[in-house]
Image (spheres, rainbow, N blue to C red):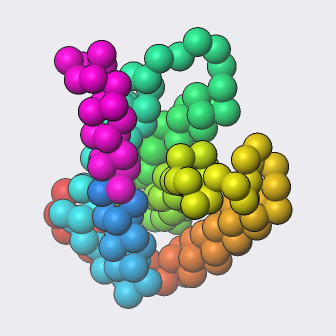
């Protein structure tokens, strides 16, 4: 049991939190393209991304794994995004730092979503049973390229006149 929930129930809760973080992240990313600062959506994205990392660390850990490493990196990137947004209020270079960190946080959520998809979804498992096969590598590579492009576009276009909603 984790937090009083069965392992299956806690896993479902973690997945729901992660999906909310990803959905909110795409809304925030889309708003960046029009220089919009969606305070409520941004807070929702960041909150649920924090919760994704926190709940991920509550799963039983027997040794250092790639999932644990990804969680650590995701947490550090998220701290940078939070400091840039709420600490430095997007002033000067912190605007670009925030955008890169926020997009990287969203990417890491999607990265894990792809990993979990190939591990848990019966339709996808045969295509990449060890996650070293071409379909898995293509999916992850395509996601990385797309997020690099989206991140570059977001850095170029996200120049809110004033950040409201803090």
x and y percentages locating residue 1 in the rendered image: 30, 16
| In-front residue for pair 138/9 | 9
Picture quadrant of residue 20 = bottom left
Picture quadrant of residue 158 = bottom left
Work out which quarter of the rendered image holds the C terminus and state it: bottom left
Picture quadrant of residue 67 = top right
Q: Residue at x 27, y 33 (%)?
A: 9
x and y percentages locating residue 26 in the rendered image: 40, 70
Residue 12 lies in the magenta-colored region: yes
| In-front residue for pair 127/38 | 127
| In-front residue for pair 43/126 | 126
As drawn, 130 above or below 128? above
130 displayed left or right of 155: right
| In-front residue for pair 53/9 | 9
The residue segment tinted magenta is 1-19
6 displayed left or right of 11: left
As drawn, 43 above or below 26? above
As drawn, 145 above or below 19? below
x and y percentages locating residue 124 in the rendered image: 62, 59
x and y percentages locating residue 13 in the rendered image: 28, 40
36 displayed left or right of 141: left
Residue pushed farthest bottom? 34
Q: Residue at x 76, y 43 (%)?
A: 130
- State the predominant SS element of the stretch in magenta: helix
Q: Residue at x 58, y 60 (%)?
A: 123
């Amino acid at each position: 049991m984790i937090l009083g929930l069965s392992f299956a129930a806690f896993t479902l809760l973690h997945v729901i939190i992660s999906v909310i973080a990803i959905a909110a992240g795409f809304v925030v990313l889309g708003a960046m393209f029009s220089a919009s600062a969606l305070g409520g959506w941004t807070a929702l994205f960041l909150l649920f991304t924090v919760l994704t990392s926190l709940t991920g660390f509550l799963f039983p850990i027997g040794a250092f794994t790639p999932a644990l490493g990804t969680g650590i990196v995701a947490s550090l990137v998220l701290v940078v995004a939070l400091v840039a947004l709420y600490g430095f209020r997007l002033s000067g270079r912190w605007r670009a730092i925030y955008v890169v960190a926020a997009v990287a946080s969203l990417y890491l959520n999607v990265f894990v979503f792809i990993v979990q998809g190939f591990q848990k979804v019966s339709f996808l498992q045969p295509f990449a049973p060890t996650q070293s096969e071409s379909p898995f590598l293509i999916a992850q590579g395509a996601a990385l390229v797309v997020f690099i492009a989206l991140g570059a576009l977001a850095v170029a276009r996200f120049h809110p006149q004033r950040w409201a909603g803090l």
